[in-house]
């Protein structure tokens, strides 16, 4: 309520934008009329039938300005949350704001860096080469002679965005109280996630760190170029980086006229992105043609790392399993991978999920492998997950969006190139790493460590249970005739079951070691001991012991 009182004027602007584009019922159901003392006659009955839902949402966001436009752009990456027609409209959202004056830009620069602009640069271009809602970019030349691009944040933008995000957070809390679908989709959590992404983009020093992290991935690759950062002239509101002179990928005709091989360019772009995603696990999440350029020597320059995505090793494993299961038409494998990638709600229906994945599998049944769109396949899978309220990690949806954007670039440069064919070597490398001896040993020892920690925690947990019982907070009543005899039988069953599980786990580990050794062509000798030979001996002894116990009991 305090937020509404403090920002009454902005709430009124939001309410009027909703009413203007046919969402007056939302204003009424959220109770904003009473809060803002707005007369109900303000609800217009203007016909909006000629516009789709997606168009009306886009128009509302455009009317409300930079914060809401940015939220819409972030939402356009979440194909797991929104239907395709709305996504298509949100993609059209563009920042259309006039640049602020060069005097203001110079003042921010000097204030942030605590330096006179004359001491920093020999010349400064007053007209920005790019302007957006958050900031604008000016060309300049340092006193040391380097040409640079200086990104300067728009004055007052942090205060404005923080205010709007507080209002959006309040509105989503209201929505969750009144609408079941808002609670079901955990709207507040999604808005918090978008808010974190937007606030991270406001910190230019974070973008500078992202740029340097990506640059380290390509220190040995002459075909990929990442501009240098000038840290002495960089802060949270000012980013100074090397100016990259090149041709944007969107200028296809210019590339042809300059004599560049479009297929070679496309291959370098794809290899650069796939390396970021599947090898490094840290990638440019907004690789549109304006953020990728071709330099004179034919190398590919990536710029603007305000939005990045991360893919952990476990996520890469699950992702590769998902794609492989789709290509092999294996529904059970797809179900397992989707459940590992996301979170199924308590009331989720796995049978219905399997049926939907069966239908999706049939859509790809007769399609040649090389013609499959990896980005579309992922987004189709995320769409099924959305229907079942499975929460997919945001980085994975960013990945799906990045792959779709990449496929659009490739289609424009060389339509004969198949990204999924180019991804095959990366997939094989992932599988090799997944079953490598070192990886298996790490997972086994990690599991043993977790098991040991759990065992060490048992006495403490037992004391807690004992304390609850002594305080009367935990009551357990058991009334079973011949309890001792029953307990002995239960002990025997549990012991044999435990022995069987241990034997199975041990066998799986041994198979993993064999597969890992075979894939990596490594010896099975560890610390001068023949691990596999000893393992089989132990497994055989355990099996004989288990069979002996079963036969001795006379209850085979």
Image (tube, rainbow, N blue to C red):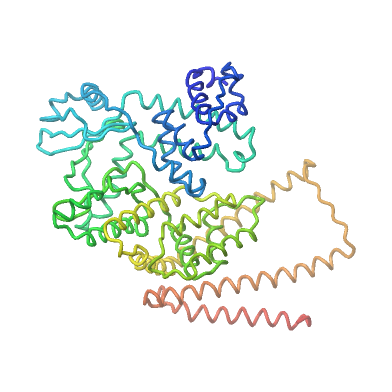
Image vertical order of residue 509 relative to residue 144, above or below = below
Residue 326 vs residue 495: left or right? left
Q: Position of residue 227 (x, y in %)?
A: 21, 45
Q: Position of residue 401 (x, y in %)?
A: 41, 50
Q: Quadrant of the C terminus?
A: bottom right
State the residue lying farthest toward the right. Answer: 481
Number of dots carrying numbers: 0
Image vertical order of residue 346 relative to residue 429, above or below = above
Q: Position of residue 168 (x, y in %)?
A: 50, 30
Image vertical order of residue 368 relative to residue 410, above or below = below
The residue closer to the viewer here, 327 or 55, is 55
Image vertical order of residue 318 relative to residue 204, above or below = below
Look at 52% across and 28% down and name the residue there: 18
Look at 14% across and 38% down and name the residue there: 147
- Residue 450 falls in which quadrant of the image? bottom right
The residue closer to the viewer here, 250 or 385, is 250
Look at 29% across and 50% down and name the residue there: 214
Q: Quadrant of the N terminus?
A: top right
- Residue 491 falls in which quadrant of the image? bottom right
């Amino acid at each position: 309520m305090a937020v509404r009182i403090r920002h009454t004027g902005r709430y009124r602007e939001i309410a009027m934008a909703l009413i203007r584009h046919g969402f007056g019922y939302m204003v009424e159901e959220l109770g904003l009329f009473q809060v803002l003392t707005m007369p109900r006659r303000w609800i217009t009955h203007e016909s909006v039938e000629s516009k789709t839902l997606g168009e009306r949402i886009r128009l509302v966001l455009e009317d409300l300005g930079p914060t809401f436009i940015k939220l819409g752009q972030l939402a356009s990456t979440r194909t797991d949350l929104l239907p395709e027609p709305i996504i298509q409209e949100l993609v059209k959202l563009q920042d259309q704001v006039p640049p602020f004056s060069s005097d203001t830009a110079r003042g921010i620069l000097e204030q942030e860096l605590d330096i006179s602009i004359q001491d920093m640069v020999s010349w400064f271009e007053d007209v920005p080469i790019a302007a957006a809602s958050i900031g604008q970019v000016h060309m300049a030349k340092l006193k040391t002679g380097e040409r640079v691009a200086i990104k300067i944040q728009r004055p007052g933008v942090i205060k404005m965005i923080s205010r709007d995000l507080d209002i959006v957070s309040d509105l989503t809390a209201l929505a969750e109280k009144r609408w079941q679908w808002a609670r079901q989709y955990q709207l507040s959590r999604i808005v918090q996630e978008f808010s974190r992404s937007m606030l991270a983009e406001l910190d230019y020093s974070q973008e500078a760190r992202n740029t340097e992290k990506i640059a380290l991935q390509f220190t040995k690759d002459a075909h990929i170029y990442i501009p240098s950062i000038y840290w002495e002239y960089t802060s949270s509101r000012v980013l100074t980086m090397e100016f990259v002179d090149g041709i944007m990928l969107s200028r296809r005709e210019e590339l042809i006229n300059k004599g560049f091989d479009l297929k070679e360019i496309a291959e370098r772009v794809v290899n650069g992105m796939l390396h970021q995603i599947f090898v490094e696990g840290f990638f440019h999440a907004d690789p549109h043609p304006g953020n990728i350029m071709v330099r004179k020597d034919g190398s590919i320059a990536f710029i603007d790392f305000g939005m990045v995505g991360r893919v952990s090793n476990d996520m890469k494993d699950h992702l590769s399993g998902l794609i492989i299961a789709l290509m092999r038409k294996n529904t059970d494998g797809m179900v397992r991978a989707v459940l590992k990638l996301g979170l199924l709600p308590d009331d989720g229906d796995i049978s219905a999920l399997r049926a939907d994945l069966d239908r999706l599998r049939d859509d790809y049944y007769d399609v040649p492998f090389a013609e499959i769109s990896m980005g579309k396949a992922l987004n189709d899978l995320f769409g099924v997950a959305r229907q079942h309220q499975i929460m997919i990690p945001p980085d994975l949806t960013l990945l799906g969006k990045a792959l779709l954007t990449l496929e659009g670039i490739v289609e424009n440069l060389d339509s004969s190139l198949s990204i999924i064919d180019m991804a095959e070597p990366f997939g094989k490398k992932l599988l090799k790493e997944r079953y490598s001896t070192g990886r298996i040993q790490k997972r086994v020892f990690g599991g043993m460590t977790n098991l040991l920690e759990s065992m060490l925690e048992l006495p403490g947990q037992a004391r807690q249970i004992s304390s609850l019982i002594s305080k009367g907070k935990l009551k357990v009543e058991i009334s079973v005739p011949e309890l001792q005899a029953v307990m002995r039988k239960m002990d025997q069953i549990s012991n044999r079951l435990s022995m069987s599980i241990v034997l199975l786990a041990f066998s799986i580990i041994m198979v993993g070691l064999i597969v890992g050794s075979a894939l990596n062509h490594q010896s099975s000798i560890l610390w001068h001991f023949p691990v596999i030979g000893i393992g089989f001996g132990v497994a055989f002894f355990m099996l004989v012991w288990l069979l002996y116990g079963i036969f001795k009991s006379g209850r085979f």
